[in-house]
Amino acid sequence: MTMLRETSSSSTIYKSEGGRTYKSEFENYGRGLRVKYHRIEQGLSLKELAAGNLSQENLRLAEMEQFPLEDKVYKKLCLRLGIPLDPFVLPLVETGILELKSLLTHIKSRSKMIEAFDNVQNQKKDHLKEIYRIELLIHTIRYYVVTGDVSAALETYEKACKFKDLMNSQQLFFLNKYRGNICYSEGNYLEALNIYKSCLTSAPLDLPSPEMADLLYTLGITSGHLVEPLDAVSYAGKALELYQDMFYPKRIAECHICIGLAEHKTRNFKNGFNHMQKAAMVVEEVHLPELEFLIEYNLGYFYFQFQDFESTIRHVEKCLKTSESGSIINEIRCYTSLIKANFELGRKDKALEWCEVGTQTTFEMEESTLSNKVVADVFNQFHLMKSLIYENHERFEYLAEMEILPLFASNGYDTEYAYYCTLVANYYREVGQKEKAMELYRKSGDIYRKVISIS
């Protein structure tokens, strides 16, 4: 059974007064910047747009606001680009974009978020201020990340990058951060971590404190995925202090989860379990059903590590009854955990039942999703346990030696690696392959001795 973290990082809701402050900074672009935006959007070169209007060099300088565009020339450029001399004031669209930005951060309601996105998309934006167009483009990246369309998110990011020279410091911050979100969603945690660290060092001075808290939290969960538990505890701890000052219960609980899992990796099991229980208290007191799955699963994970398999089963079964199980892949995590716990208790018949349920669920997965490494790893763990229960020896040995053992040997999850070493060693002992069994017993023994000595 492996710990479960959030599969995508999230950002922070702006308070209404913060939204107004941010909105007031969205002034019209100067003439040169307007021309540059539409030239880039329409895929025109400097030479193509300048032809018959002004020199290419003067157009380049004008786009840098270093050469004034006279009325006559500006009108000709606007006519060539098919844009009005001044952008329209579209308060409904502008407000809708800022509302969408707010809903995309610390998401409370996916339905409201989707509704807000559709509402903005359905509005006429032909003559919207260019700064708002860029703002919408940037946060559309986030929308696609949240809704799981990573390809669309990457495509939108690449489109947004064309306008980097036109962005203010906060827009550049979000563009870079959302690129990190894409990497995170793809399971490329190292690149995501490096991007988030660059965001931390280059964060604008006027970045709202909730956004800084979110960035620290994101650094914490990403460090956790890379098995850098001390960094995870440090980042998430700083985020927790900020969130407690702002009193944001959902993220307070998430920080406790992150710290709890990281403390487990430092083998500070007691402290880790305490943080998990604090998270559970917050979720129960404030009623956060969207976190119930995450809490219950990870409590089951802790109990599994303590070899309290009955408690593991109780918590993981509760996961499957929550309204926020999240995804098919999370369901498969649960089925795998239940198979393991029942197997350890000698309840093969019950383990078989969960194998059957899990198999039906895997049929619902699109084959293309297995290209995602995180998904493939969860998929392989399920099928390893299924092949063990069904006594499919060839399949079990292949998955054990080619997928699961190499995975945990390299990713730093030593207690999970020790568990699988013991599991596979027990199998080899039963089928008479004593040398392989002894080698794996030695590996698991070394890990457990290290855990005991540190604990």
Image (cartoon, grey):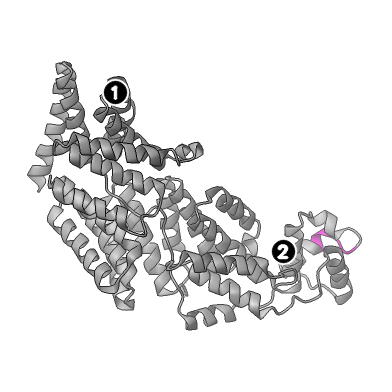
- Rendered image quadrant of residue 199: bottom left
The amino acid sitting under disc 1 is Asn
Seen at 10% across and 46% down, the residue is 454
The residue to which callout 2 is attached is 37
Does any portion of residue 1 appear in the rendered image? no
Residue 224 is a magenta residue: no
- Residue extent of the magenta highlight: 53-58
Instruction: Tell me the crowding category of disc 2: few under 14, some 14 to 19, or many 20 or more residues within 10 angstroms, Cα based.
Output: many
Picture layout, residue 153 above or below residue 89: above
Furthest residue toward right: 52
Contact (CB < 8 A) between labels 1 and 2? no
Seen at 60% across and 65% down, the residue is 118
In the rendered image, residue 280, in percent from the top left (x then y), is placed at 23, 64
Picture layout, residue 244 above or below residue 389: below
The residue to which callout 1 is attached is 392
Count of numbered labels shown in the rendering: 2
Seen at 34% across and 55% down, the residue is 221
Left or right of 447? Residue 123 is: right
Q: In the depicted view, which residue is nearer to us: 277 or 33?
A: 277
Secondary element under disc 1, as helix, strand or loop, is: loop
Does any portion of residue 403 appear in the rendered image? yes
- Rendered image quadrant of residue 60: bottom right
